[in-house]
């Protein structure tokens, strides 16, 4: 038996375990293992887990969800019209006689947004083509300038306007009858704004009395 005073006593398995700085609760070391209220923690599989505050924010985002504009446009095709006609047929009628029928439909129809959009687009598009055609023809009537100098360019411009007007007339009527919310470049944006003017809002349901 060795009585060396410098020799330290043997340490058992229990004495070799590292000492903890504080009490542990359920595998968490003290209170420092818990994150703040609503903080993000890692859940099973490495996916983030949000506390009560994060869940509340996600629920508020779900409640504030708004349907895309395409869904609202598709729904307007099925909405009733002022003339008691099918919305697609009424939209086709707004292109049938160029901007003349567009003006009529726009003034009469105040309930269906789909029809009002096509009527407004008919007014702007075919009205613009008619105005451009009238200006070109007026320049062609100017003596010497229109009859001789610019005779060929004016004839070409007149033909282009007529071809574009005829093809767009057929194309827009077909797309309107198919229920398409087709927007022409530049003109379609202004037509969409014009369609919302003086539009009759749907009646709100009256809540039952308490």
Image: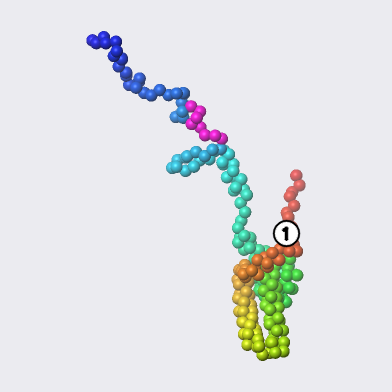
Name which residue lies at 74% across and 49% down. 208
x then y, percent, for residue 157: 63, 83
Q: Quadrant of the N terminus?
A: top left
Relative to the observer, which residue lies in front, 143 or 22?
Answer: 143
Name which residue lies at 65% across and 70% down. 187
Relative to the observer, which residue lies in front, 7 or 174?
Answer: 7
Relative to the observer, which residue lies in front, 110 or 69?
Answer: 69
Q: Is residue 37 above or below residue 85?
A: above
Q: Main secondary structure of the magenta part?
A: loop
Q: Is residue 138 above or below residue 29?
A: below
Relative to the observer, which residue lies in front, 139 or 144?
Answer: 144
Quarter of the image for residue 136 reads: bottom right
In the image, taking residue 135 as reference, residue 1 lies left or right, namely left
x then y, percent, for residue 75: 64, 62
Residue with the mark numbered 1: 202
Q: Quadrant of the C terminus?
A: top right
Q: Which residues are magenta?
A: 30-37
State the scheme by which the image is colored. Answer: rainbow
Residue 164 visible in this rendered orientation of the protein: yes
x then y, percent, for residue 160: 62, 82
Binning the other alpha carbons within 10 Å of mark 1 as few (below 14), some (14 to 19) or many (20 upward) gives few
Name which residue lies at 49% across and 42% down. 48
Residue 33 covered by magenta stretch: yes
Quarter of the image for residue 202 reads: bottom right
């Amino acid at each position: 038996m060795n009585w060396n005073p410098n020799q330290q006593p043997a340490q058992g398995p229990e004495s070799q375990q590292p000492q903890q700085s504080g009490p542990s609760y359920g595998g968490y070391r003290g209170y420092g293992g818990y994150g703040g209220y609503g903080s993000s923690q890692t859940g099973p599989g490495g996916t983030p887990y949000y506390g009560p505050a994060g869940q509340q924010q996600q629920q508020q985002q779900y409640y504030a969800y708004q349907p895309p504009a395409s869904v609202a446009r598709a729904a307007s095709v099925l909405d009733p019209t002022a003339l008691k006609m099918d919305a697609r047929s009424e939209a086709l009628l707004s292109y049938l006689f160029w901007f003349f029928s567009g003006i009529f439909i726009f003034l009469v129809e105040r309930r269906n947004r789909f029809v009002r959009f096509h009527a407004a687009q008919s007014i702007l598009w075919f009205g613009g083509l008619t105005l451009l055609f009238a200006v070109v023809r007026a320049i062609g009537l100017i003596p010497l300038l229109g009859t001789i100098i610019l005779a060929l360019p004016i004839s070409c411009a007149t033909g282009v306007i007529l071809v574009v007007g005829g093809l767009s007339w057929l194309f827009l009527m077909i797309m309107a009858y198919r229920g398409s919310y087709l927007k022409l470049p530049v003109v379609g944006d202004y037509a969409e704004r014009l369609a919302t003017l003086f539009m009759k809002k749907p009646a709100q349901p009256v809540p039952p009395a308490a």
